[in-house]
């Protein structure tokens, strides 16, 4: 057996590998010999002298040829990079059929015959709502804050990308804002980013752009907003505008007031930093930024925005878990009162405490 294996390996190396190596070596040697003069200092000195001699006649063909070849090479790399992502070679790409059947994990709700809620059971605390059951103020606050040209682009905002490239990358101005549209953010929420080492950011960004364009081709603008507001994480295992409305203001998504919608939309930038229950003052400042954006893009009169900014931030915080309802999964549940260190701000925050005992 060993002798047979030795003969096979010897045949592979002598009859296949050795001729192939000689062929490659010969081709590379010939190429190197033909290009060797271009790697010498004398060659480039000669080219520089030719360019200096012809400079009076504005002959820039030498430099033009170099930049032209570099540009073609760069374009070729970008095209190959695009098709590698589009084809799923660098990670699975959702098909049109999959995007058409997008659905979110929602809580299961059990009701009694009389309509009483017996209990909610979930891994992700989410309740989907239709676009018409979402407060217009929430939609307007979202568009004004996250993507002012949402109704004008098809998933990719060229102006925002140009601003990010010039201000953020070239001028290193971190306050210039991001370039992701709501469609791209939805793509990121539906298909979380993956780790690609050094290529992490360009691969994920381009992947989200491709998915965003596909989403825009399948869904209307209102449907994209509906998907986004049902998908967006609001901190912890809380998802979507409906459950956030219930938790922080004890109301439904279609009954949100303008100032309440501004608080929830403001949280999207950083769900912990701008959580009104954890950081009251920061949340209020962020709410006022959202109101300013709404006035800037004519979703709200300037005077109305100014008056809403003066209002104290009032919560009707109602924390519900699997244990709530007539058929909970444990003995009792009692929502927490104001968190430690915030007792002195009780006048600024109105908190509803829900306590249910079972047994």
Image (tube, helix red, strand yellow):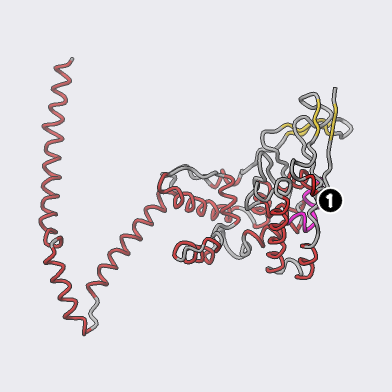
Report the quarter where the C terminus lies. Answer: top right
Query: Does the stretch in magenta take in 300?
Result: no
Q: Residue furthest top?
A: 1
Q: Is residue 33 left or right of residue 175?
A: left
- Residue 98 position, x and y percent, is 56, 43
> Mark 1 highlights which residue?
347
Tell me which residue sits at (54%, 44%) in the image. Answer: 192
Q: Secondary structure at mark 1?
A: loop
- Residue at (17%, 16%) from the top-left corner? 2
The image quarter containing residue 14 is top left
Residue 253 location in percent, x, y? 77, 50
Vertical placement of 126 versus 170: above or below?
Answer: above
Tell me if residue 329 comes above or below residue 288 in the rendering.
above
Q: Position of residue 246 (x, y in %)?
A: 78, 44
Instruction: From the viewer's side, name the closer residue of 174 and 7.
Output: 174
Mainly helix, strand or loop, the magenta region? helix
The outermost residue toward the right is 114
Residue 294, percent from left and from top: 71, 64
Between 307 and 137, the one nearer to me in the picture: 307
Highlighted range, magenta: 250-262
- Magenta span includes 261: yes
Quadrant position of residue 335? top right
Residue 302 versus residue 96: which sits nearer the camera? 302
Residue at the far bottom: name it: 56
Instruction: Give the quadrant of the N terminus.
Output: top left
Compared across the picture, whether 292 is left or right of 46 comes to right
Q: Is residue 286 left or right of residue 180?
A: right
């Amino acid at each position: 057996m060993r002798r047979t294996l030795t003969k096979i390996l010897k045949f592979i190396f002598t009859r296949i590998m050795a001729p192939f190596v000689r062929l490659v070596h010969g081709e590379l040697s010939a190429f190197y010999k033909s290009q060797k003069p271009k790697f010498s200092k004398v060659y480039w000195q000669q080219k520089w002298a030719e360019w200096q001699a012809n400079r009076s006649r504005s002959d820039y063909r030498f430099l033009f040829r170099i930049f032209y070849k570099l540009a073609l090479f760069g374009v070729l790399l970008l095209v190959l990079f695009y098709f590698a992502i589009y084809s799923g070679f660098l990670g699975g790409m959702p098909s049109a059929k999959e995007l058409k059947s997008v659905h979110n994990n929602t809580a299961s709700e059990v009701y009694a015959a009389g309509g009483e809620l017996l209990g909610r059971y979930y891994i992700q605390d989410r309740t989907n709502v239709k676009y018409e059951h979402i407060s217009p103020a929430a939609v307007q606050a979202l568009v004004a804050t996250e993507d002012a040209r949402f109704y004008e682009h098809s998933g990719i905002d060229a102006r925002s990308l140009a601003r990010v490239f010039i201000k953020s990358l070239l001028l290193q101005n971190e306050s210039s804002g991001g370039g992701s549209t709501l469609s791209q953010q939805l793509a990121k929420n539906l298909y979380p980013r993956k780790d690609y080492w050094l290529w992490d950011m360009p691969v994920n960004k381009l992947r989200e752009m491709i998915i965003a364009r596909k989403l825009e081709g399948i869904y209307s603008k209102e449907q994209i907003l509906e998907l986004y507001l049902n998908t967006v994480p609001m901190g912890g295992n809380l998802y979507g505008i409906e459950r956030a409305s219930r938790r922080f203001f004890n109301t439904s998504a279609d009954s949100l007031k303008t100032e309440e919608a501004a608080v929830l939309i403001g949280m999207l930038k950083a769900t912990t930093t701008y959580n009104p229950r954890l950081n009251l003052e920061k949340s209020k400042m962020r709410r006022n930024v959202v109101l300013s954006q709404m006035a800037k893009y004519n979703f709200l009169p300037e005077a109305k925005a100014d008056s809403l900014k003066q209002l104290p931030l009032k919560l009707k915080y109602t924390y519900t878990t699997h244990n709530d309802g007539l058929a909970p999964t444990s003995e009792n549940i009692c929502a927490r009162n104001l968190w430690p260190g915030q007792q002195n701000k009780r006048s600024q925050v109105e908190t509803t405490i829900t306590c249910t005992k079972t047994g």
